[in-house]
Image: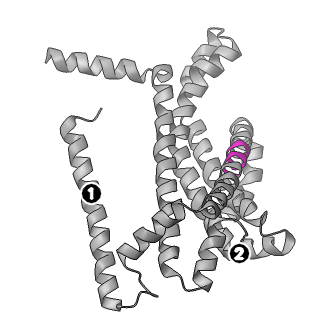
Amino acid sequence: MQTKHGRLYNLIVSVSAIVCMWVVWLIAYFAVNDGYVVPSLWDTVVEFFSLLCSARFWSAFGMTLARTALSWLISLALAAALASLSASFYGVRRFLAPFIAVFRTVPTMAITLMLLIWSSPRVAPSIVAVLMLFPLSYAQFMAAFDGTDIKLAEMAKVYGVPPAARLFKIYIPQILPPVLSQVGANLSLTLKVMISAEVLCSTFNSLGGLIYESNVFLDTAQMFALTISALVAGGLLEWALSKLTLLTRRWTGGEGRVRRTKEVGERD
């Protein structure tokens, strides 16, 4: 657990990083001295709050977020199912290895352009996001499966522990925490990939479509504001989903370990 001084230190460092980025922005703005290339902070802030009052922005944001959530869920479910098979059967793992390598290395832009030919600007970004996130989620699940305590599972089997009890008392408590610790970052990454694909596909009624439109009309302040809105949304989603690990503390004995550590500290 973080102490009060630790949280204060983290806050100071985070604020310092934000101030540093703001200073770099100011330096770039005054060095270029062209609002079409680097907009001023004030113009960007005004445009950002203007977007928050726009029904068109919220419609586009909702559509992008819906596509992102759907792609994330599909890739997560697909990775969990195939990783389970791979962990159970070595042949399945070897069979899937070339596919995972291809999905991991194929250029995002190339696959987006191909899918744009075969599908529509509405569908292509979702498929791209699934294909980009699936190998990452699959690798995370495989790492969690490979990290389970095999000796503990074998001991439970020897002592006749029912399969359901082994699943919920041994396997899931070991697999779930490392997987849940990554879901927030994965969703944030999915949002980034989705917006990039939407820009490339010029998807109507999406954040990527609005960014593409801002680029066409040289509205750099709006482009920066839309980018900031995507950063804020991704950061909030990642922070919210990072709290899912709290749900597994009691299940995995995390609270007990923390309590025992505190008791030892008090005795010392």
From this view, report whether residue 251 is shown above or below residue 196: above
| Residue 107 visible here | no
Residue 127 locus on image (x, y percent): 75, 60
What residue is rendered at 64% in x and 54% in y? 65
Residue under circle 2?
202
Q: Nearer the viewer, residue 130 or 143?
A: 130
Residue under circle 1?
15
User: Dot 1 surroundings within 10 Å: few (below 14), some, or many (20 or more)?
Assistant: few
Identify residue type, mark 2.
Ser
Query: Magenta part of the protein: which range?
Result: 71-78
| Residue ranking furthest to the top | 159
| Residue 124 visible here | yes
What residue is rendered at 75% in x and 52% in y? 96
- Which secondary structure lies at badge 1? helix
Residue 72 within the segment the image draws in magenta: yes
Q: Nearer the viewer, residue 170 or 97?
A: 170
| Left or right position of 54 against 254 | right
What residue is rendered at 60% in x and 14% in y? 156
Residue 18 locus on image (x, y percent): 31, 63
Quarter of the rendering containing residue 202: bottom right
User: In what quadrant of the picture does the N terminus appear?
Assistant: top left
Say whether marks 2 and 1 touch (CB < 8 Å): no
| Left or right position of 7 against 200 | left
| Left or right position of 72 against 180 | right
Identify residue type, mark 1.
Val
Q: Nearer the viewer, residue 103 or 255?
A: 255
